[in-house]
Image (spheres, rainbow, N blue to C red):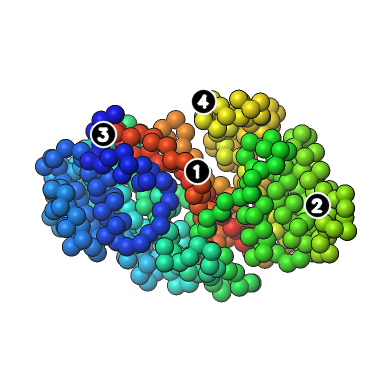
Amino acid sequence: MKNRFNRLTSKEWLPFQKSWFRYTDDHKLLSEHILFFSKAEITDQNVLYAGDNKEIVQDICTQGTIPLLSEDEFTDQALQYALLDIRQKSMSLPSLADYYDLRKHIIALAVHIFRNLEERRFLTIFIPNVFINEIYYPIAWDLAYQLSGLLSLKDEKIACNNHLPSGRSMPYSSANTNTFYCLNFRKDENSGGVYTEKQHHFFDLPLSDKDQKKELNIPAWFILKPAPRKKNEVLHPAKYPEELVTMFLNNFTEKGQNVFDPMSGTGSTQVAALKSGRNAYGTELSTFFMDIASKRCEDVVSPMQKELFVPEDISGIYKIINKDARLITPDDFPEIDFMITSPPYWDMLNMKGAENQAKRIEKGLQTNYSENEEDLGNVADYEKFLDDLNNIYFNIATLMKSGSYMTIVVKNIKKKGRNYPFAWDLSSLLMQKMVLLPEVFWCQDDINLAPYGYGNTFVSNTFHQYCLTFFKP
């Protein structure tokens, strides 16, 4: 296939499609973005750059025979690509009011860019979420929201600081220095073309370091390759690994405390909790999967040779009930110390033709959670799905102790050419009553890249998931 989008070969194109990358230096970062999003043919349409690395960008564009404009030079020239690097400005903000001033400037510039950007070309913004006066603000999410009515948000690539080994623990307060977002917007048929302020709850209950009851250490990003799934675990179409659960249990709970998952699946949360000396509770709508989860828990606490395989610190206390998570009551479980879960990613498992679906069908495996109309994985309306999920978590929060935490493993969703920021949308709803801690990224490095959009446009392979943790005040 002829590459009509940029001057890269397929070998150069493919790695850029991965939705996270190890950040090493600014020259490589800027070069990869400018060369990827600049046109295949020599053109007099400009690349616009605004940021603190003008000399690096000038060198890249000169070598690539790409016409370059700075923000000061930009009036109404035709643009093939725009890149706004506001990392340094974002990380040195004295107050939230200063962020609003910066946001106003970026929005005005983006409106100007939109008018001059060629159809189906891109605007990229480098921006981290930040602490301002020791309070955490997800400003990257806010800016993405504000610009989403003007341009189509096609993807967020996550830059992971390569200077921090992924296995080393670091304080939550340092998270914003070790990851940042590359927000990629496109001018296309889904672009509104008009800026309208979007409301959210990202700044309603900000987290201060001083509010923390514990000293928390966890990587800002990590690579996790789970152990191969066993036969009964493969039956579930979207299992998440016990290794991930254990990582968060070790940070947010003590032995003997009560751990809960409202969508238990095959029991990943409960098995990890029991093996870590915690008590394990949960609900599961599917009787089929509940039975598997209960059997797995029983195998942990009462294996055939118990004296050989059961460590002394396993509590042996578990309870998984066949119940719709919407209907959980205080009578069902004792007070919860920590909730960790991975909900359905909307109705994506019902999308026909997906590669993973085809493989499961070929093996005779179930391709969705259930056929139950009440199953959240079968709710077709996105807003209803979000509201139902949010109400479940608010209900569970009433069963949790003050000062406890909940962790939710999710990812943003691409469906029929549109990007649904599921992780951010859910966070906004929960932040009406819960306090968001800095997000942590589970980066997957063991999946084959697919050349989506090759030769025509940028479509990333989503290989990162958000581990969102919330604090109950």
Earlier residue among tags 4 and 3: 3
Q: Amino acid at mark 4?
A: Gly
Give the residue pinned by disc 3. Answer: 3
Q: CA distance from mark 4 to mark 3?
A: 26 Å
The image quadrant of residue 246 is: bottom right
**Is 238 left or right of 180, judged from the image as shown?**
right
Earlier residue among tags 2 and 1: 2
* 60, above or below 267, in the image: below
**Is 362 left or right of 289, judged from the image as shown?**
left
Q: Which mark is residue 353?
A: 4
Disc 2, SS: helix
* Residue for point 13% across, 45% down: 77
The mark lying in front, picked from 4 and 1, is: 1
Does the CB distance between marks 4 and 3 fall below 8 Å? no
Disc 3, SS: loop
* 262, above or below 359, in the image: below
Of the pair 314 and 418, the residue shown nearer to us: 314
Q: Residues within 10 Å of mark 4 (few under 14, many from 20)?
A: few
Tell me where residue 229 appears, x and y as whole percent.
66, 43
Q: Residues within 10 Å of mark 1 (few under 14, many from 20)?
A: few
Tell me where residue 49 appears, x and y as whole percent.
22, 54
Disc 4, SS: loop
Q: Amino acid at mark 1?
A: Ile
Tell me where residue 185 appears, x and y as whole percent.
33, 44
Earlier residue among tags 4 and 2: 2
* Residue for point 52% across, 55% down: 223
